[in-house]
Image (tube, rainbow, N blue to C red):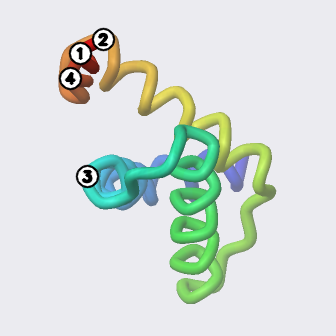
């Protein structure tokens, strides 16, 4: 329960991290996820929190899924 509360408190930060990584990283999705997890973990550690990578990954994947579904991330089609 304590980890869930920490994740909820960090959610605005996680949203900002996901958006920033999506805008700046041109590598495939897995690389973006790794960068986002590392950023969130670094910030969590700096604030005295320890969150398992798996939990951070699940939240990030959920945020990305919602952003993809709602059109926040609009991927441009690549001409063939």
Residue named by callout 2? 80
Residue 79: which disc? 1
CA gap, disc 2 and disc 3: 23 Å
Camera-nearest residue between 59 and 72: 72
Judging by the rendered image, the residue that carries numbered circle 4 is 76
> Which picture quadrant has residue 71?
top left
Q: Are marks 1 and 2 in contact (CB under 8 Å)?
A: yes
Mark 3 burial class by Cα count in 10 Å: few <14, some 14-19, many 20+? few
Residue at 48%, 47% (x, y): give it.
8
- Closer to the eye: label 1 or 4: 1
Which SS class for mark 3?
helix
Displayed quadrant of residue 58:
top right
Q: Which residue is mark 3?
A: 23
Which tag, 3 or 4, sits closer to the chain's start?
A: 3
How busy is the neighbourhood of tag 4: few (under 14 within 10 Å), some, or many (20 plus)? few
Q: Is residue 73 above or below residue 7?
A: above
Alpha carbon of mark 1 to alpha carbon of mark 2: how far?
Answer: 4 Å
* Residues at circles 1 and 4 in contact by the CB criterion of under 8 Å: no
Contact (Cβ within 8 Å) of mark 1 with mark 3: no
The answer to whether residue 73 is left or right of residue 39 is left
Camera-side mark, 3 or 4: 4
Query: Upstream in the sequence, badge 2 or badge 3?
Result: 3
Element at badge 2?
loop
| x and y percentages locating residue 27 in the rendered image | 49, 50
The percent position of residue 2, horizontal first and vertical second, equals: 70, 54
Q: Secondary structure at mark 1?
A: loop
- Residue 79 position (above or below residue 67): above
């Amino acid at each position: 329960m304590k980890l869930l509360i920490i994740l909820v408190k960090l959610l605005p930060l996680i949203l900002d991290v996901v958006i920033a990584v999506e805008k700046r990283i041109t590598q495939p999705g897995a690389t973006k996820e790794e960068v986002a997890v590392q950023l969130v973990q670094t910030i969590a550690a700096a604030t005295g929190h320890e969150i398992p990578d798996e939990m951070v990954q699940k939240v990030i994947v959920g945020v990305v899924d919602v952003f993809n579904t709602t059109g926040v991330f609009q991927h441009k089609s690549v001409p063939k």
